């Protein structure tokens, strides 16, 4: 049975959008959840403020230079400051940590996520880039398939991956304990982003500010740009492929602008099970931390006194060619996800620095994907090397 002692949570990326929402969930848990560790790369003033409030056992500043430049005048006296990315791996394996909330953005989140699984912890996974990059390696480390309410009661002693991404949380919640063979397909919903109705001509003129303004979700800059190109949905198709071990033919995408249905499972008899809720990331975060329990929490409630519309429309692969890359990489597996992910991270950064047009992000990724030597069974070292290579290639592409 579940013990009454608080669940120790390491919030990696605590100053980000997911990280701050996670701390709200922890705060509202009345001691059920405890922040054992928090981490950030930049914004160390914010990290220190969080430490003052929560008095965690560890505070991790992953960027040594930023850490050296910060004064650290007000850390609580029982809080230990650790510096550098290796500290994440050490803390992930600490005995006081039951769950690692992986909320670092990008492939920078890979090693700490793997370290947590190696140490037989629960990983509440927001960092989808880890699965895109190294899905097969991550799968092999799991003691529990991410599918149903099975043994999850071992209380922190099994390597398990519980999704925080709202679509994957919805699918996880809608899967129940049915047999995999009963699933006809899963359908990921997509808001369509800020440019859902824009023409090709309009898309060619998108500015940085327009791309940073998402209609339904308030998120960090990288995933906000990914939502605008729909690369986010492409990454989520790959994430779903590995998380639920489904062939790409069983994964679909539908546009649903209201973001009320977070995703669905269609069964072989034609019945569809969906999960609904307000667009509030505190819901899937809390679900992943408390799973398999459901408890009252700080998330908004859907207002049933209001009129609601639920609209669906097919995704447009012509205006949003990122989608095709996602399905391709989910099918090809091997090294393709790592290359797509790194190319995209570098291309998004170039776009945010004004070096690349919005509509060049996906063609740049495609050309690097096509240039790489595909390997169906890569090692971790190979993936890390490809991650570096693809970033360099984007740099060359931008300068050409
Ligand atoms: P964010 O940019 O708001 O926060 C990122 C966090 O990671 C910050 O704490 C930052 O200090 C830290 N970080 C940045 N670079 C780092 C590095 N090199 N090494 C270590 N730490 C680093 O991002 P976010 O929107 O909170 O997203 C975090 C992750 O969650 C992403 O993988 C994203 O795809 C995923 N996600 C986010 C949302 C959302 O609503 N924001 C929804 C679903 C999934
Ligand atoms: Mg999502």
Image: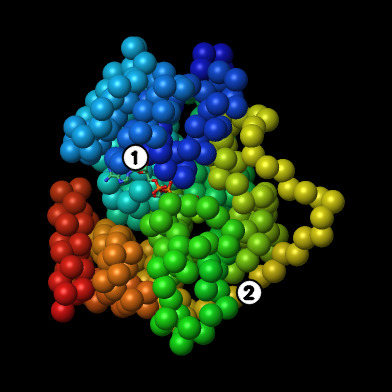
Residue 120 drawn at (x, y percent): 35, 28
Q: Residue tagged by mark 1? A: 43
What distance separates the C-alpha of mark 2 from that of mark 1?
40 Å
Q: Secondary structure at mark 1?
A: loop
Label ID, residue 288: none
Please report the residue visible at 59 percent of the width from the left and 25 percent of the height from the top. Answer: 29
Residue 16 drawn at (x, y percent): 42, 43
Q: Is residue 101 left or right of residue 384?
A: right
Relative to residue 18, is residue 400 depicted above or below? below
Relative to residue 380, is residue 250 depicted above or below? below
Would you call the spot at circle 2 few (<14 residues within 10 Å), some (14-19), or many (20 or more)?
A: few
Of 87 and 339, the residue lying toward us: 87
Q: Is residue 276 left or right of residue 48?
A: right
Q: Residue tagged by mark 2? A: 313
Q: For the N terminus, give its image quadrant.
A: top right
Residue 369 visible, this orientation: yes
Please report the residue visible at 37 percent of the width from the left and 39 percent of the height from the top. Answer: 13
């Amino acid at each position: 049975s579940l013990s009454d002692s608080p669940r120790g949570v390491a919030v990696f990326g605590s100053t980000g959008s997911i990280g701050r929402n996670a701390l709200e969930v922890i705060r509202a848990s009345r001691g059920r959840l405890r922040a054992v560790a928090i981490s950030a790369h930049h914004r160390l003033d914010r990290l220190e403020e969080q430490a003052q409030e929560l008095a965690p056992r560890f505070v991790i500043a992953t960027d040594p230079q930023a850490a050296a430049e910060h004064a650290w005048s007000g850390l609580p006296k029982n809080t230990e400051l650790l510096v550098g990315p290796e500290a994440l791996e050490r803390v992930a394996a600490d005995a006081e940590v039951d769950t690692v909330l992986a909320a670092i953005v990008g492939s920078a989140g890979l090693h700490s996520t793997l370290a947590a699984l190696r140490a037989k912890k629960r990983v509440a996974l927001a960092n989808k880039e880890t699965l895109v990059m190294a899905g097969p390696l991550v799968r092999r480390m799991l003691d529990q398939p991410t599918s149903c309410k099975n043994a999850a009661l071992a209380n922190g002693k099994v390597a398990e991956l519980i999704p925080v991404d709202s679509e994957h949380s919805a699918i996880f919640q809608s899967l129940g304990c049915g047999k995999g063979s009963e699933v006809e397909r899963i359908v990921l919903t997509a808001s369509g982003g800020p440019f859902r109705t824009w023409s090709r001509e309009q898309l060619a003129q998108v500015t940085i500010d327009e791309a940073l303004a998402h209609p339904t979700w308030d998120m960090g800059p990288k995933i906000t740009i990914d939502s605008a190109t729909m690369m986010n949905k492409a990454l989520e198709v790959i994430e779903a492929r590995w998380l639920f071990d489904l062939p790409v033919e069983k994964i679909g995408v539908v546009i649903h602008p209201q973001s009320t249905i977070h995703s669905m499972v269609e069964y072989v008899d034609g019945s569809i099970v969906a999960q609904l809720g307000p667009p509030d990331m505190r819901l899937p975060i809390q679900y992943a931390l408390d799973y398999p329990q459901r408890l009252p929490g700080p998330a908004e409630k859907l207002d049933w006194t209001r009129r609601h519309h639920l609209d669906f429309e097919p995704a447009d692969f012509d205006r949003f060619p990122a989608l095709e890359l996602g399905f391709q990489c989910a099918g090809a597996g091997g090294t393709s996800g790592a290359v797509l992910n790194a190319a995209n991270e570098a291309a998004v950064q170039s776009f945010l620095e004004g070096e690349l047009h919005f509509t060049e992000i996906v063609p740049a990724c495609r050309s690097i994907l096509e240039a790489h030597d595909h390997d169906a069974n890569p090692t971790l070292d190979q993936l890390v090397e490809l991650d570096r290579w693809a970033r360099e290639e984007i740099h060359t592409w931008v300068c050409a």
